[in-house]
Image (spheres, helix red, strand yellow):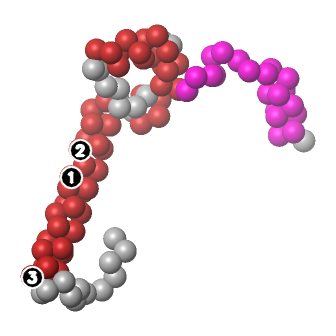
């Protein structure tokens, strides 16, 4: 019953400006500030309430980019090997 009351109270509040427009927009001070950052070429990776401070996010992105580069390198070597054997694929699952 408490859950139902909570939802009803939220519906009664309608649209509240402090929760609209996305978390990052709100954290940065509004859409105007986001547009100013964008026009200067500044990049905000994520809101600190979501992923923490920028150094953590930067390490996370660098890790993901490194994994992506390795996956592309493996795929490229696989294509080269396939071409070396006359286009005949010798291997297992190619779904990756």
2 and 3 marks in contact (CB < 8 Å): no
Instruction: Return the x and y of residue 2 as percentages of the image width and height.
Output: 86, 38
Q: Give the mark nearest the N terminus, 1 or 3.
A: 1
Q: Is residue 56 left or right of residue 80?
A: right
**Residue at the image point whose x is 79% and y is 27% from the top:** 10
Q: Which mark is residue 84?
A: 3
Q: Which residue is mark 2?
A: 62
Q: Magenta: predominant secondary structure element?
A: helix
Q: Is residue 14 above or below residue 64?
A: above
Q: Is residue 68 above or below residue 41?
A: below
Q: CA distance from mark 2 to mark 3?
A: 33 Å
**Circle 3 Cα neighbour tier, 10 Å, few/some/many (<14 / 14–19 / ≥20):** few
Secondary structure at badge 3 equals helix
Secondary structure at badge 1 equals helix
Q: Which residue is mark 1?
A: 66
Q: Is residue 87 above or below residue 18?
A: below
Residue 6 is one of the magenta-drawn residues: yes
Q: Which residues are magenta?
A: 2-22
Q: Is residue 95 left or right of residue 24?
A: left
**Residue at the image point whose x is 30% and y is 44% from the top:** 60
> Quarter-wise, where is residue 47 in the image?
top left
2 and 1 marks in contact (CB < 8 Å): yes
Instruction: Return the x and y of residue 27 as percentages of the image width and height.
Output: 48, 19
Q: Give the mark nearest the N terminus, 2 or 3.
A: 2
Instruction: Return the x and y of residue 81 as percentages of the image width and height.
Output: 13, 79
**Residue at the image point whose x is 9% and y is 82% from the top:** 84
Secondary structure at badge 2 equals helix
Q: Mark 1 vs mark 3: give the one in front.
A: 3
């Amino acid at each position: 019953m408490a859950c139902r009351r909570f939802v009803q109270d939220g519906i009664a509040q309608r649209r509240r400006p402090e929760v609209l427009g996305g978390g990052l927009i709100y954290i940065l001070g509004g859409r105007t500030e986001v547009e100013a950052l964008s026009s200067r070429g500044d990049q905000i990776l994520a809101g600190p309430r979501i992923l923490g401070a920028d150094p953590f996010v930067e390490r996370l992105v660098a890790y993901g980019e490194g994994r992506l580069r390795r996956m592309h390198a493996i795929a490229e070597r696989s294509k080269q090997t396939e071409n070396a054997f006359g286009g005949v694929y010798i291997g297992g699952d190619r779904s990756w």
